[in-house]
Image (tube, grey):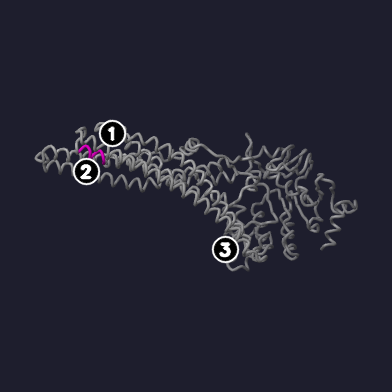
């Protein structure tokens, strides 16, 4: 996970382009914000006019003047109401749309990241970043330009009007503004760091909850509920500690703003009182002055209080940008073309590979040629690189050195989508999505008809048990397919590949976790699936690969033996030892 920290300016530059599709809404929102500001600016002037006129001569205060000023203010309030409605409605909708766009972009970017990223990042952290962290963006996107725009208008106009009333008193009041800004900025930096820690800890809690709930059968089997509760409570208390620190900073923040508010009001009372006593300011002007200072202080306080929401929004944007800046390690090379109608010949030329995160070298200068339509099996000790070798063909990882060719062309010359579209993979750990049997099989060919799905299920030997389920193909399989047995899930995954109908198949220990009866049923399905296709099989149960065209023995030293079953047994080498040992255990 990218944990780089970004300056506020950098984050804003990355965020502002999201306003582009909604710039008309934004401009209208700012126009409405300006209209609402007019009411607050006009009111003190109206009060000043009435007060000064009355003090000069009550007879000058006519019914026409009072009703005229009242009508003006009433019209302004009507305009203010409509403007406020637009801001509350369309302004928030604009923020929600920006949040939605950002979440879409983050999710799309995650789909392009390599296995290395997901191997090193907790799912709970990722989920937190594309859900909770972006919740604050709606309010931020709406209120940030709006609040700052209103503040600029009020501060500038208030300063101009107050300066015209009494310039010296205005300078005395405004001298507190830069001091307040510096103090608040110092606290804000700490608040942003605290909010970031808070978001990170929420991600850790999500990851802990997900891990514990998904493994709840193991927890119960080992009666480790108390241990899991203790682990959760440790994270929960850490979150409380961070949140307590955050609230303390917020306390410092709000207290400092109240102190400066008080100092500004004190300046107006004392300074304004002396100016009033010396006749340098009129009573009506003093009333207007107090009202404008109140408006000014309320504006500054609102901006300062918005700083909390601002920091929350910036934290959410930062964690979003950290996802977006995660490197896409596997991508389409310039000039890549679609793979069409491949024969299925696969060649490894001096291939070396080490994992990018820990630089653990798996193999070096590996050479291998698999003929089109050939059924090749790979056996060997755990950690020898069998699964890694298979993961290189669909480019789940890229080779460190050397080349992999399909039909004589480097796999990097093909688009990722077309390359993977032509390779079917059946893994030991079957992943079924939460949904129906039909939806899970149809995942191999989006939009497939029921007839196509049923035909694929029949070929996979799955139709019979599916018909026996409560709602046959519309049966809900549960999260990760928990309502089905291991053999049933495996046959559904095979049906999914049948529906995909690729010319190349990778079988990664597809039967090793099954009981004998399920293994037999699945093995028949796999044999049917392999017909006429280039097939690469990884197996621990050697009985399932006896009929392979060629068997490779892969160890840390590379491919040390190859041949069919009978040839390798006659050699009495590693394969013979391995086969004899496995049979003895079984």
Residue farthest to the left, as pictured: 59
Marks 1 and 2, how far apart at CA:
28 Å
Q: Is residue 465 magenta?
A: no
> Considering the image in quadrants, where does the N terminus appear?
top right
Choose between 301 and 505: the one closer to the eye: 301
**The residue tagged with tag 2: helix, strand or loop?**
helix
Front disc: 1 or 2: 1
Callout 1: few (<14), some (14-19), or many (20+) C-alpha neighbours within 10 Å? Answer: some
Q: Which of the two labelled residues, at mark 1 and mark 2, occupies the earlier sequence position?
A: 2
- The reply to whether discs 2 and 3 touch (Cβ–Cβ < 8 Å) is no
Q: Main secondary structure of the magenta part?
A: helix
Image mark for residue 169: 1
Q: Position of residue 578 (x, y in %)?
A: 84, 55
- The reply to whether discs 1 and 2 touch (Cβ–Cβ < 8 Å) is no
Front disc: 2 or 3: 2
Q: Which residues are magenta?
A: 284-290
- On the question of residue 452 being in view, the answer is no
- The reply to whether discs 3 and 1 touch (Cβ–Cβ < 8 Å) is no
Residue 411 located left or right of residue 294 = right
Callout 2: few (<14), some (14-19), or many (20+) C-alpha neighbours within 10 Å? Answer: some
Instruction: In the rendered view, tell whether residue 29 sits above or below residue 584.
Output: above
Residue at 85% in and 58% down? 581
Marks 2 and 3, how far apart at CA:
64 Å
Q: Which residue is mark 2?
A: 73
**The residue tagged with tag 1: helix, strand or loop?**
helix
Q: Which of the two labelled residues, at mark 2 and mark 3, occupies the earlier sequence position?
A: 2
Residue at 24% in and 33% down? 165
Q: Which residue is mark 3?
A: 474
Choose between 306 and 496: the one closer to the eye: 306
Q: How many marks?
A: 3
Marks 3 and 1, how far apart at CA:
77 Å
């Amino acid at each position: 996970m990218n944990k780089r920290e970004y300056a506020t300016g950098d984050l804003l530059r990355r965020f502002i382009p999201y306003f582009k599709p909604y710039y008309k809404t934004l401009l209208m929102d700012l126009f409405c914000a300006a209209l609402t500001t007019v009411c607050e600016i006009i009111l003190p002037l109206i009060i000043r006019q009435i007060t000064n006129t009355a003090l000069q001569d009550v007879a000058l205060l006519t019914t026409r003047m009072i009703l005229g000023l009242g009508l003006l203010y009433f019209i302004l309030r009507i305009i203010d109401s409509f403007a406020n409605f637009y801001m509350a409605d369309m302004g928030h909708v604009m923020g929600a749309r920006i949040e939605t766009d950002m979440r879409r972009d983050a999710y799309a970017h995650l789909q392009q990241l390599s296995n290395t990223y997901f191997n090193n990042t907790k799912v709970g952290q990722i989920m937190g970043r594309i859900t909770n962290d972006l919740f604050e963006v709606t309010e931020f996107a709406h209120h940030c330009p709006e609040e700052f725009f209103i503040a600029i208008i009020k501060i500038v106009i208030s300063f101009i009007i107050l300066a015209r009333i009494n310039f010296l008193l205005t300078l005395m009041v405004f001298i507190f503004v830069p001091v307040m800004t510096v103090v608040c900025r110092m606290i804000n930096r700490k608040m942003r760091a605290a909010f970031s820690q808070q978001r990170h800890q929420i991600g850790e809690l999500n990851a802990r909850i997900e891990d514990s709930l998904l493994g709840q059968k193991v927890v119960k089997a080992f009666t480790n509920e108390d241990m899991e509760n203790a682990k959760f409570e440790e994270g929960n208390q850490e979150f409380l500690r961070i949140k307590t620190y955050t609230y303390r900073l917020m306390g410092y923040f709000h207290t400092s703003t109240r102190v400066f508010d008080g100092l500004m009001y004190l300046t107006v009372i004392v300074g304004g009182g002396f100016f009033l006593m010396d006749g340098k300011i009129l009573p009506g002007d003093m009333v207007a002055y107090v009202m404008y200072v109140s408006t000014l202080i309320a504006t500054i306080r609102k901006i300062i209080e918005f700083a909390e929401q601002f920091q929350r929004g910036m934290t959410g944007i930062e964690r979003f940008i950290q996802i977006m800046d995660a490197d896409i390690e596997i991508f389409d090379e310039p000039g890549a073309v679609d793979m069409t109608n491949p024969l299925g010949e696969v060649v490894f030329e001096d291939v070396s590979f080490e994992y990018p995160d820990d630089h653990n070298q798996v193999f070096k200068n590996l050479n291998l040629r698999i003929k089109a339509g050939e059924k090749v099996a790979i056996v060997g000790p755990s950690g020898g690189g069998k699964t890694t070798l298979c993961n290189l063909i669909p480019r789940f990882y890229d080779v460190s050195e050397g080349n992999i060719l399909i039909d004589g062309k480097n796999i990097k010359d093909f688009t990722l989508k077309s390359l993977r579209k032509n390779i079917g993979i059946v893994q030991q750990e079957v992943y079924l999505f939460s949904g129906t049997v039909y939806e899970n099989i149809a995942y191999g060919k989006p939009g497939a008809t029921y007839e196509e799905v049923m035909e694929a299920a029949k070929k996979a030997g799955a139709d019979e048990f599916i018909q026996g389920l409560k709602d046959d193909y519309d049966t809900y399989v549960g999260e990760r397919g928990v309502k089905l047995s291991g053999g049933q899930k495996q046959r559904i995954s095979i049906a999914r590949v049948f529906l995909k109908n690729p010319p190349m198949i990778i079988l990664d220990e597809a039967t090793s976790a099954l009981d004998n009866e399920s293994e037999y049923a699945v093995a028949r399905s796999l044999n049917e699936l392999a017909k006429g296709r280039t097939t690469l099989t990884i197996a621990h149960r050697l009985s399932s690969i006896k009929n392979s065209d060629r068997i490779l023995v892969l160890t840390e030293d590379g491919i040390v033996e190859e041949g069919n079953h009978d040839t390798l047994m006659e050699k009495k080498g590693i394969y013979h030892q391995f086969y004899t040992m496995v049979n003895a255990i079984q």
